[in-house]
Amino acid sequence: MDHDPSDPPGPSAPILPASAAGLPPAGVAAPTGGGAVLGGGAFEGANRFDGLATWQPSIRSADAELLPDKPILDARVRDTLRNDAYVAGGATLHKDNIVGSLFLLNAKPETRILWGAEDETWEREFQEEVESKFTLWAESQSHWADAARINTLTGLVRLAVGVYTAGGEVLASAEWMPNDGRPFRSAVQMIDTDRLSTPPDRFGESNIRAGVERDRRGAPIAYHVRMAHPSDCAYGNLDIDAFRWRRVMAHKPGWGRRNILHVYEQNRPDQSRGIAAMVAALMEMKMTKGFRKVELQRAVVAATYAASIESDLPGADVHAAMGADATSGNPSTQWAMDYLAAVNEYSGGAKNLLIDGAKIPVFMPGTHLKLQSPGNNGPMGDKFEASLLRHIAAPLGVSYEQLSRDYSNTNYSSARAAMGETWKFMLARKKMVADGTGDFIYRLWLEEAINAGGITTLRRRNAPNFYDGLNAEAYAACEWIGAGQGQIDPLKETQAAILKLKNGLSTKEHEIARLAGGDWRKVARQIARERDLDESLGNPSVYDRDTRDAENSLTATPRENDA
């Protein structure tokens, strides 16, 4: 590699002769020519015979493995999401457990970076003003945050989580909307990731991978986006924009404002695009759906026939024993007809062949009635389907019980363990996808609001410039309140939360957000309002500080409660 003047200087290394450049150090044993040992080396997994003989995967780069198969994988995942109720329910679980019904901003400005010292008063005033104004704009039913004017902030974040679940990546652009009376001109345009592709005239350029143009270090510098979805030119809906591309810079030249949000998780270095985690279970998903279909068909067929008549009557060999020959008719048939005629004549006037009005059928000897039960399980039954569902639940990051909605064999301990593992997965997904989308939108809005003088708490002398140093990050620092974790046993979990608060191991902000997904400041204000109203009306208040019974019962240990 050529030396880059911008690279930091380092100790000079001795230059080896050309003849020694490719040789290992002296004393190091290595196979001649660097080839693999025949039959494998010290690892059994490298065995080239026996059951592993046909397992010969190739070594390829991340993009070489992913990009050729991404279109078919994305199509199959989407087809599964459309047509498999379990998988669709698992994707909905992501939205409900990460975002919930309201995605709230919790501003956390870094006052030490901005002002050089902690300023609790200014921080509190900034938080309350910014959160109120941003939430009014972001959750307005005018849908200011969405350039398409369809979703609120919560809807955009839920959309991002759903798209990420289906395709492993999220794509959106920052837009500067016309001045048509809207309070702020910043908005976000969600983009279908299918539109991110390399233009035909740029094929062969090594710095463009599936529409992502990168510099020599791999950092994205531009994105090539089709003006319309590639399928919009099919089925008679000819759209010329499907053959046009727009090159969008990753950041605004000059001051670095982000133009594109591209969220995906790298599984390997040099990976340019994302892929859904559930592709690892696509085969199990297809098998599970096929298994359920076959089981349903079997049940329908079984339900079509309420009963069957099974007979042990003899066949051709018995016919011969009865004296039949090739030219005569079937003697067993004639015998059966005579027998049934006699039974019919006998039972026609009999009164004792009925029980409570229900008729008792009479069959030929060796013949019996078998009632069909459409609910009978197949040879593999529920255990096989449960095994397949566990394979599906694993890449979705949810428990089997949550995916299948089957809690029949679940106790409190196992439910808590499953919820804990799911919650860790959801927190990681929330930080990357939901918080990443929220941060992108919030920073666009905050930058415009500050530049327009819309933040009154910054109307003071020597307010830090948004673009200096780390000030932009310090102003826009925040957390997001999404869905609460939920509770299995509200009493035990409330006791645990109170004990943590009393012992300084947690905060109201954290516990209220975790249990209910709420804003602790709004909860505190509402409690104060209710207490004041109770006092004005002379009603006993549940918030009365002198009332200790409820508090003592909640903070008591489980053994004290049992006593």
Image (tube, helix red, strand yellow):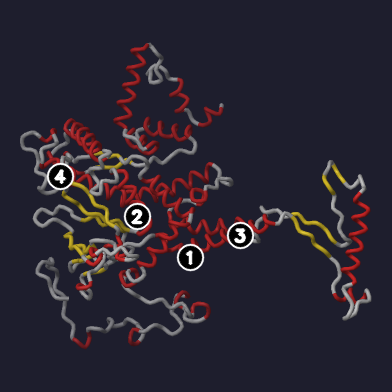
- Asked which secondary structure carries label 2, the reply is helix
Q: Which residue is mark 2?
A: 163
The reply to whether discs 2 and 3 touch (Cβ–Cβ < 8 Å) is no
Amino acid at the residue labelled 4: Glu
Instruction: Tell me the CA gap for discs 1 and 2.
Output: 21 Å
Instruction: Tell me the CA gap for discs 4 and 1.
Output: 47 Å
Residue 182: % across, % down: 17, 40
Amino acid at the residue labelled 3: Gln
The 10 Å Cα crowd at callout 2, few under 14, some 14 to 19, many 20 or more, is: many
The reply to whether discs 3 and 4 touch (Cβ–Cβ < 8 Å) is no
Could one spot residue 505 in this view of the protein? no
- Asked which secondary structure carries label 3, the reply is helix
- Horizontal arrangement in the rendering, residue 471 relative to residue 293 (left or right): left
Q: Earlier in the sequence, mark 3 or mark 4?
A: 3
Quadrant the C terminus occupies: top right
The 10 Å Cα crowd at callout 3, few under 14, some 14 to 19, many 20 or more, is: few
- Asked which secondary structure carries label 4, the reply is helix
Residue 280: % across, % down: 43, 63
Q: Which residue is mark 1?
A: 283
Q: Earlier in the sequence, mark 2 or mark 3?
A: 2
What residue is drawn where x is 82% and y is 45%? 358
Q: Earlier in the sequence, mark 2 or mark 4?
A: 2
* Residue nearest the viewer, comparing 473 with 350: 350
Amino acid at the residue labelled 1: Met
- The image's mark for residue 447 is 4
- Horizontal arrangement in the rendering, residue 77 relative to residue 326 (left or right): left
- Asked which secondary structure carries label 1, the reply is helix
- The image's mark for residue 297 is 3
The reply to whether discs 1 and 3 touch (Cβ–Cβ < 8 Å) is no
